[in-house]
Amino acid sequence: METAQFRLAARPVGMTKESDFERTTETVRELNDGEVLVKTLYLSLDPAMRGWMNDAKSYIRPVQIGEVMRAGGLGVVVASKSAKFAVGDHVSGGLGVQTYWLGAADDRSAALYKIEPSLAPLPTWLNTLGMPGMTAYFGLLEVGQPRSGETVVVSGAAGAVGQTVGQVAKQLGCRVVGIAGGKDKCDMVVNELGFDACIDYKNGDVRAGLKEHCPNGVDVYFDNVGGDILDIVLTRINMKARIVICGAISQYNNTTPVKGPSNYLSLLVNRARMEGMVVFDYADRYPVAAAALGKWLKEGKIKSKEDVVRGIENFVPALNMLFEGKNFGKLILQVADQ
């Protein structure tokens, strides 16, 4: 048996290219005691992956040249010499961009945990019940701290994190305004996900849209994009507003320095708070978020939207869909059939 892998071959400059990776195959060795072999079924494609390729200090060490590209994933155990997982168990964790993962069942870097496919479709475990859902839940509730009746603005509203942020905010009694690229995405955000409004930054004026849809200002801004949109929203924030810095997808492929907000003095004038969040800080409380989100999903109060691309060979163009704005919902790469 062999495993196909994508290994980082070069540090990307700008958008990721096929030449930034080496495709390799390895014979799967025999398992040692305490190890499991996992067949990869789905991989999570996330904007953060672009940052992991840079040789720069961050919240997690960069992927090294020659290493299998880091990626969260979901698979099925096909061989086991561990009491922790049995053959047939479905697990999620850091599987990497490869068709099989082999390692210790308690490997901290992979952080494998068992999931129950009878509770939700498998892709949902990489979206609302996975890392994006955890990010949305804790970023909004712990950092954003929305209160019923407040106005919450979410950029990247049609993406993995943004879709859940907005839907959770609605459950809390907030007015929710999304920002997304293109009429089709904005229609989905309003008509399928239940946002009160959505501003099309590609074909409209964000400043005018905020004035129209947030007549009472912005109390919470959940930022997934950074750049100009963050700067514009800062001009509309209310007294004691909370700005959650979750991501800055507009800046990840820059070949020039990251653009910071020039309107930051609005934080001073409005005694507002801007705070970054990294989901790993809440790892010990993931079950709390999963229980709440799972309940809302079961009750039909929130939806989990996934955009699935088939074939590990399509890893690079699929990843770049994130930065081209082509995905509708959480972007997932299907590696193998269930």
Image (cartoon, rainbow, N blue to C red):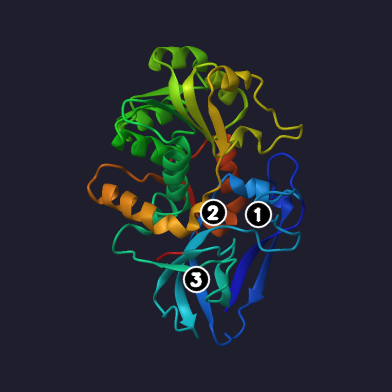
Please say if the residues under marks 1 and 2 sit with CB atoms less than 8 Å apart. Answer: yes
In the picture as drawn, the residue positioned furthest to the front comes out as 271
**Could you give the CA–CA distance between mark 3 and mark 1, rounded to whole angstroms?**
25 Å
Above/below status of 28 relative to 44:
below
**Mark 2, other Cα within 10 Å: few <14 / some 14–19 / many ≥20:** some
- Quick check: can you spot residue 46? yes
- Quick check: can you spot residue 335? no
In this rendered view, identify the residue nearer to me: 237 or 272.
Answer: 272
Q: Which residue is mark 1?
A: 60
**Could you give the CA–CA distance between mark 3 and mark 2, rounded to whole angstroms?**
25 Å
Quarter assignment of residue 330: top left
- In the image, 204: left or right of 247? left
Please say if the residues under marks 3 and 1 sit with CB atoms less than 8 Å apart. Answer: no
Q: Position of residue 209 (x, y in %)?
A: 45, 15
**Could you give the CA–CA distance between mark 1 and mark 2, rounded to whole angstroms?**
10 Å
- In the image, 11: left or right of 125? right
Residue at image point 60% right, 72% down: 3
Q: Which residue is mark 2?
A: 280
